[in-house]
Amino acid sequence: MKKYYIVVLAIFMVFSLQAKEKNITKTFLSNNVEILKLESKLGDVKIENWAKDEIEINVAIKALSNKQLVAEKIVEKVEDTKEEVYNDEAVEEEMVEEDYDAVVGAEEVFYVISVSATKTEEDAKKSVAKLKKNYEKSDYLWIPDYKSLSGKELFSVFIGPYEDAVDAFDMLKKYKKENKNAYIVEVSQKQERLSILDKFDYRINNVRQKLIISYAEKEALDEYYNNGGEDWSWFNSDVKAYFDEKFSNSNISYIYGVPFWLKEQDMIDFAKEIGNEKLTFGYYLIDGSKTKFIEHDIVSSVTDKIVNFFGL
């Protein structure tokens, strides 16, 4: 009877900040072993000869993530080394293989300022070292590891990562003074690519979005309710539903409140820029360099004005 030892190794590597490591060691007698099969996911296998009548497997698992919790979960999900003995009949072992995407999933979402891309990891490390002289919070990643990125087999050098897009945008404004082509990209396992090139230049799958920003300044909204105004959120829902239904393919993004990459002060400054000195509440429309503010009104009136502004 032939005997086979099958050892399955799973090593997950995720480029970023927080690190979690785990080492596994297994020793097997090598008597009558005719075939040794090693499988490694996202890791290298190094084989060395020695004089002992045994086989020792050392597995080094290292997960790197921008979040310590995610790194820990990745390591926890890696299955331990397994030993199985088969006879010469074709008996198939059912291995529990953890899907990398399921491990990282929606938990791993962060923002980076894209600086450059390199073909080799060595060049990426050199670029990061140079970048760190002025931007300590810098790193690199392997683009194919994340579905939200381009998929190109390159290493992306970036400033970051940032858990909050607001922090990323604050840094982008500074960095653009020396690199006007820099932009923010969301890094995740989502299929959708989200990027921010400027204050109101927001793109989905590289297409610039027409923005409807439904914004309510607190004092103005309080006054509205004190005067018997109806539920503001109800109006928002109806306006958004109208455009979702009628113009779902028109590259319109409806944003309720301050855009997730901006601060309250950014909206206040923008309101002043377009001549709305007193922040009330309503709808800020942005289409490239074109801007407009529409005060709160009945749904049909608001939607008609928005359609006319965007030329839909």
Image (spheres, rainbow, N blue to C red):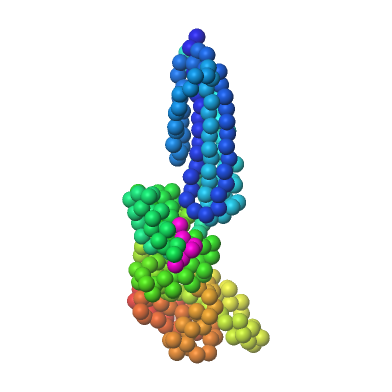
* Residue 102 visible within the image: no
The residue at the far top in this view is 1
Q: Position of residue 101 (x, y in %)?
A: 49, 46
Q: Nearer the viewer, residue 212 or 131?
A: 131
Would you say 55 lies left or right of 311 here? right
The reply to whether residue 21 is in sight is yes
Residue at the (38%, 55%) spot, across then down:
126
Q: Nearer the viewer, residue 229 or 278?
A: 278
- The image quadrant that residue 203 belongs to is bottom left
Residue 3 painted magenta: no
Instruction: Residue 208: give x, y in percent of width and height.
Output: 37, 68
Which of the 4 image quadrants contains residue 244? bottom left
Q: Which quarter of the image is occupied by the C terminus?
A: bottom left
Residue range in magenta is 134-139
The structure residue drawn at horizontal position 43% and vertical position 53%, both measured from the top left corner, is 141
Q: Where's residue 23, x and y in %? A: 57, 37
* Above or below for 51 versus 1: below
Residue 136 in magenta stretch: yes
Residue sitting at 56 percent across and 80 percent down?
Answer: 216
Q: Residue sitting at 41 percent across and 50 percent down?
A: 142
Which SS type dominates the magenta stretch?
A: loop
- Which percent across, then down, holds residue 127? 38, 58
